[in-house]
Amino acid sequence: MMQVQPIFLKTLLAYIKSTYLPAKRHNPKYPDSFTSGDLHFFAPAVAELSAAFTSERNSRHANYFNTKEARSSYLLYFLVPNMLKVQWIFEQQHFADLFSEETEVRIADIGCGPCTGILAAAQYWQSHAPQQKLSCVAVDQNTAMLKDGRNLLNKLTEHNSKDGTTLTTHAATLAQLRKALGNNRFHILIVANVLNELRSTEERFDFVSRLMSQHLTPNGRLVIIDPALQRSTRDLMLLRDQLVTEQKVARVLAPCLHQQLCPMRIANPRDWCHSYLEWERPQVIADLDMLVGNRKEYLKMSYMVMSAVQNVPKQKIGDTWRVVSAPMKSKGKVEILFCGENGKMLRVTRLDKDRSKENSGLDQLQRGDVVRYGGDERCLPNTVVAIQIP
Ligand SMILES: C[S@@+](CC[C@H](N)C(=O)[O-])C[C@H]1O[C@@H](n2cnc3c(N)ncnc32)[C@H](O)[C@@H]1O
């Protein structure tokens, strides 16, 4: 279960109030919590931005964070969920162990908004290896968002013992990336909720392949996150196939357990591979959900973790599957889709009459879980489905 550090939330809310709430609305009794009046003040912009993010990408104008309404609502409603998604991936991938031998871990967050990925990295290392030094570079076209990100990181590191984090910001477009990043290579490249803003398949492919070849260390990891929407996720599935299987310029380490063409993309043009994470939704987000008519009960995303081709991932044991659907219950049975190391999808059906203690774990499975499963399409009473706790 993902949850935001209370001290970060408190710091963030105080920052939003002091930076974006008009002075005449300030109530000194509540410096870092939101009154109903405050929530009503920010809710219309939250609703507008939320609608823009779920609509056609063309409906957003190029630098949409130019208004303070858009920036404040992003900080209030989108920053924490997006940070937690990045942190979850870091945890799943054990980045603190992976890079424990490095003198400093170099991280670049591209299209970073308010430095979401870097704030997530700082929190993650604070709880896993606080002595590790982080050297971070943030790139975004929007200067004001970069400033918010820097201010938040400064405040966060003031509270934490973690003072070994440096941040360089570059106000630049993706086309100016080489100028911003120079010849530097990074252990972690973060591209979160940005690819879906690029207009064409070619643009996405060129951008990611150049990023990896010019700016990733040989042992590095590229983390891509996109919204769990059908269209942006299908685009990401296609990009993965182009990079990994067709052009062989990258390896995918997660969520896929194999390097072959994505079987879901081929099987059905309507399906999209996305994950749901459980989280402890902060009260302020639950309150805004009520006001704007959303339901952020789960953290939803599509994601990919990739490495350079020469970086061979460790050998997996057989019979390992990624759960790529929710359990689908109907009369007399439950069905679920697995995607395996062999590059194939398996639709597993368990008849109610076959339910046993050994296979009851199937009922609790969620999209994104990894399981060991030795059976075939029909899940028999004694087929073991063990959930691997990552
Ligand atoms: C939805 S926000 C995501 C911010 C952050 N990565 C996150 O996940 O919270 C997308 C960001 O990408 C930036 N962006 C979009 N297109 C860009 C471009 N061509 N060059 C630079 N930044 C861009 C926007 O300014 C915005 O800050």
Image (tube, rainbow, N blue to C red):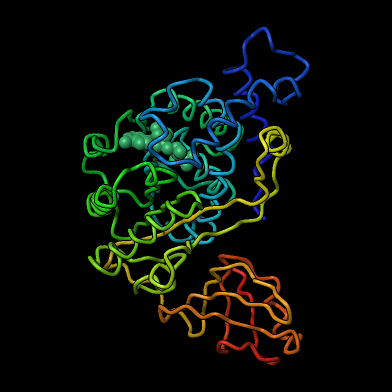
- Residue nearer the viewer, 285 or 336: 336
Residue 36 x, y percent position in the rendering: 76, 24
Q: Residue at x 21, y 43 (%)?
A: 183
Left or right side of 364 for 241: left
- Name the quadrant of the N terminus: bottom right
Residue 314 x, y percent position in the rendering: 41, 74
Q: Quadrant of residue 98?
A: bottom left
- Residue nearer the viewer, 89 or 78: 78
Q: Residue furthest right?
A: 29
Q: Residue at x 65, y 45 (%)?
A: 296
* Vertical side of 216 occupied by 339: above or below: below
Residue 69 x, y percent position in the rendering: 53, 22
Q: Residue furthest top?
A: 24
* Vertical side of 337 occupied by 269: above or below: above
- Name the quadrant of the C terminus: bottom right
Q: Residue at x 42, y 59 (%)?
A: 304
Q: Residue at x 52, y 77 (%)?
A: 321
Query: Is residue 118 at least partly visible in the picture?
Result: no
Which quadrant of the figure shows ligand 1?
top left
